[in-house]
Amino acid sequence: MDVNTESWQHKDLLGIAQLSPWDIARIFETAVSMKEILNRPIKKLPTLRGKSVAMLFYEASTRTRVSFETAVKTLGADVGSFSVSTSSVNKGESLLDTAKTLDAMKFDLIVIRHTSSGASEFLAQNLRAGVINAGDGQHEHPTQALLDAFTLCEKFGVLGTKHLQEPAYPDRLLTGRKIVIVGDILHSRVARSNALCLQRLGAQVTFVGPPTLLPPEMACWNVGISHDLDAGLDGADAVMALRLQLERQKSGLFPSVREYAELYGLTLDRLRRSGREPLLLHPGPMNRGVEVDSELADSLYSVIEEQVTNGLAVRMALIYLMSAPL
Amino acid sequence: MDIGATKKQILNEDGIQRAIARIAHEIVEQNAGVADLVLVGIHRRGVPLAGRILAAVAEIEGVRVPMGVLDITYYRDDLSTISGNVLPVIRETAVRFPIDDKIVVLVDDVLYTGRTIRAALDALMDIGRPKKIQLAALVDRGHRELPIQADFVGRVLPTSCRETVSVCLREIDNRDEVVLSIET
């Protein structure tokens, strides 16, 4: 094989679970070059001219959806957008029938977000088009994890074409780094995907949250666990706050939002005390004053806005890798 | 000539160095100096070549002009026809200076169909609006498929389509030579 080429094996992206460290490094390597394009005066490539990508969102989303759409358009492909509220789903059409219709319209890729875990895999098994999981129930949200890990690698200075051209060891990109994920781990596909992704790159992951919001099967996750935020933050290189879904309180999983903010809310003070001045990540949308203090969210610790920019670059990379050779 | 021979050296190390020196002189002469001049090397072997031209220009004029590097993969016209799930490796694009109103000299190793240069022109236009774009190539082997020509050429080499021109540069290949080979 030509040394100048490498293969991309995946028709679909359903979860981090299917990706090797080498796959992840390949996405990052491509994303670095996509980021350069985002900084140009003319942010438009002809690369995927003639390709088309459908957005099939069964759940509310602004950033993920706009990010995917912008990524598709920047690469020169066309985007078809469908949201449940304005589509035939309202008339009772099944997920498979809706998706098969899109398949018949010759979309090359279908990006799906759905409330049911496994929805994307179900489509992948039944469609010709490639499927990208943009969040399925409590299962995975792989592109979020990829953009988070990319942001960390970039901040820690382990990315760059030179670095990846002499393939180092992708499974050691984050070796020795301690990453803390705080909040409602139980219901979070972001936490699941992130734990898988960060561990694949060599990081040590710690979950922090009240016992009622941690998944019971955590023993097989190989992560650190703490119910005490300050203890969990000790020596952390980065901390990721998860959005607290306020309706969880009604189901009795924690007593009050105020108490939660007191015990598990991230503040400037807490980060300063933790030893290594960790980076703050948040997948958004943020509840200021609940999981993250407003002052901290706007401080120099925060890389939240960079996460959004990197999300665009990572999604461009993924769409390029998945649709260019089809 | 040996009947079994399928390879022929076209340029050796000295030949390459002389060609680069001449290209540098021609660039300086044609542009009456190096005012507004920038170099952009096309990955892969255009990059070290641009670096050498830059050094040669600096020797003549005493000025190191800005140099950028360009990966043209995203602008190729054959991406969708590459067979299998094989994709080119994307290398760095770094033009860290404004190219508006500059004279950009694009540098590549072999000028063949002209499609790479077409892609590079499109990429440059997305980065800025140069006053002029010129093209320097170490070897021009003919067989153009687009109306593109070089301004500065190291060696014009008539070839057949069955032949391959390989440029080896010590920065990448650990040796300097240009070889013409026939696929058998």
Image (cartoon, grey):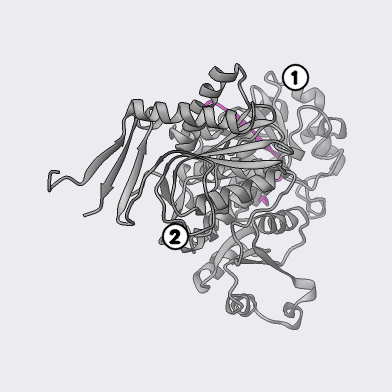
Residue A54 drawn at (x, y percent): 65, 68
Snapshot quadrant of residue A61: bottom right
Question: What residue would you read off at disc 1?
Answer: A273
Labelled pair 2, 1 in contact (Cβ < 8 Å): no
Q: Which mark is residue B82?
A: 2
The picture places residue A187, in percent across and down from the top left corner, at 68, 52
Query: In the image, residue B34 lies at what x, y percent?
Result: 64, 26
Q: Which quadrant would residue A272 be assigned to in this image?
A: top right
Is the residue A126 above or below the residue B44 in the image?
A: below
Part of the protein shown in magenta: A173-188
Circle 2 chain:
B
Is A140 colored magenta in this rendering?
Answer: no
Residue B112 lies, in percent from the top left, at 43, 51
Classify mark 1: residues with Cα within 10 Å, few (<14), some (14-19) or many (20+). Answer: few
- The answer to whether any part of residue B35 appears in the image is yes
Report which quarter residue B30 is drawn in.
top right
Mark 2: amino acid: Ile
Magenta stretch, main secondary structure, is loop
